[in-house]
């Protein structure tokens, strides 16, 4: 069994100073809304917190010191952006919209269908649209809570000797590092990301696990979502049938593949590796540090490590022509998926079989031919249609 001694930034939120009060948050574009408050009142934050606390303590932290965002610090952000965001500077979660527009988070998703191979069938999640949108909203809270619970840090690089014209900052979040350079004359900024794909994949995968546990413990919630609904959602998220409708899926697959390689190199069970990956995320580690690189080298897998590191660095920062996720053009996601396909092929057969069981999960999928009624994917397979 091989151990990886990782460099880490440490637990908690550091370097951001005091949290701004509601007046300052309002001036920064954060506000409350009846629609958001009605949703938050139906979410069991005590159960959510307890699940995150268990992981936090398991990773060496103290439950009382965990940076979990309570509902009073969840706002509507009025300056646009992703549907939901954790803002480490303000230490709030925001469901975002542009001023004067409606929140899109609570709108039923447009129906999306995927062709099933070369057949005449089309596949869709076997969940009502209104239930889907509610699970999505809960899942977005969990994703942003995971960011908040992970290591978050801010520091200015250079100190007294820094340039009078350029200031350099480093922001850390989980496995992600953002080096930002600000020109004090032109006010222009330049940011370089490292670990973005890994960090978003781990965040999303942790949130999926918490979502499953949350509904398993509750059975059903005040939003009308059941554990069975949540499991169907997770099944559809995992299934390679769907390339649209589920954000950050390629990043999750990248992390799943990375974990398989780490398990092979470390010669330990994948569950043990995954717990180690989560610990590094919560402590602010680096999955591409020299200790892990050396372990891959000693195992004869330097090419694999270099490829994983190169994909993450290149695609974290890539500005890919035509990339417009808001309008269904996920060029960057497709590029990550292509990288995943390359890395998948070099895995051992045992790892491929394990991942295939996840990627080919169709238990939450319904199918139909144009003009026919919906049937389960299992029924289609049973009838050999």
Image (cartoon, rainbow, N blue to C red):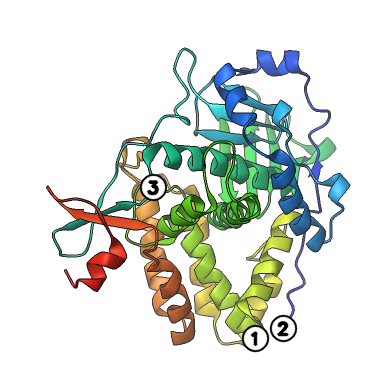
Q: CA distance from mark 2 to mark 3?
A: 43 Å
Image spot of residue 245 (x, y percent): 37, 46
Is 261 positioned to the left or the right of 155 in the image?
left
| Labels 2 and 3: the sequence-earlier one | 2
User: What residue sits right under mark 1 in the picture?
Assistant: 267
Residue 248 in the image: above or below residue 277: above
Circle 1: element type: loop
> Do tag 2 and tag 1 residues touch (Cβ < 8 Å)?
yes
Q: Is residue 116 left or right of residue 299?
A: left
The crowd level at tag 2 (other Cα within 10 Å; few <14, some 14-19, many 20+) is few
Using the rendered view, name the quadrant where residue 368 is placed. bottom left
Between residue 249 and residue 231, name the one nearer to us: 231
Closer-to-camera residue (129/13) = 129
SS state under label 2:
loop
Mark closer to the observer (2, 3): 3
- Residue 133 position by quadrant: top left
Q: Tell me the distance, in whole angstroms, between the alpha carbons under discs 2 and 1.
A: 7 Å
Expressed as whole percent of the image width and height from the top left, the position of residue 211 reads 59, 51
Q: Which mark is residue 127?
A: 3
Q: Earlier in the sequence, mark 2 or mark 1?
A: 2
């Amino acid at each position: 069994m091989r151990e990886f001694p990782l460099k880490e930034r440490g637990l908690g939120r550091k370097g951001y100073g005091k949290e701004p009060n509601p007046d300052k948050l309002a001036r920064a574009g954060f506000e409350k809304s009846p629609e958001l408050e009605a949703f938050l009142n139906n979410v069991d934050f005590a159960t959510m917190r307890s699940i995150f606390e268990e992981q936090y303590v398991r990773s060496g932290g103290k439950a009382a010191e965990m940076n979990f965002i309570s509902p009073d610090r969840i706002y509507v952000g009025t300056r646009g952006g992703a549907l939901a965001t954790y803002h480490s500077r303000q230490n709030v979660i925001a469901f975002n919209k542009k001023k004067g527009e409606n929140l899109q988070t609570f709108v039923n998703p447009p129906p999306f269908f995927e062709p099933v191979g070369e057949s005449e069938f089309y596949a869709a999640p076997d969940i009502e649209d209104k239930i889907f949108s509610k699970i999505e909203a809960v899942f977005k809270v969990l994703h942003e809570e995971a960011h908040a619970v992970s290591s978050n840090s801010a520091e200015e690089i250079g100190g007294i000797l820094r340039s009078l014209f350029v200031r350099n900052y480093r922001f850390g979040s989980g496995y992600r590092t953002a080096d930002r350079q600000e020109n004090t004359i032109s006010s222009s900024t330049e940011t370089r990301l490292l670990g973005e794909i890994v960090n978003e994949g781990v965040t999303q995968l942790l949130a999926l696990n918490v979502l499953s546990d949350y509904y398993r413990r509750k059975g059903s919630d005040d939003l009308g979502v059941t554990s069975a609904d949540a499991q169907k959602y997770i099944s559809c998220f995992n299934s390679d049938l769907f390339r649209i409708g589920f954000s950050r899926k390629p990043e999750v697959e990248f992390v799943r593949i990375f974990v398989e390689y780490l398990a092979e190199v470390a010669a330990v069970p994948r569950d043990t590796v995954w717990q180690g990956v989560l610990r590094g995320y919560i402590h602010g580690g680096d999955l591409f540090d020299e200790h892990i690189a050396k372990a891959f080298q000693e195992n004869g897998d330097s090419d694999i490590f270099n490829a994983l590191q190169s994909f993450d660095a290149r695609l974290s920062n890539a500005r890919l022509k035509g990339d417009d996720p808001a309008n269904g053009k996920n060029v960057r996601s497709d590029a990550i998926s292509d990288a995943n396909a390359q890395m998948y092929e070099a895995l051992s057969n045992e790892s491929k079989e394990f991942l295939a069981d996840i990627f080919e999960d169709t238990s939450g999928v319904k199918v139909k031919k144009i003009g026919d009624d919906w049937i389960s994917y299992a029924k289609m397979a049973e009838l050999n249609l």
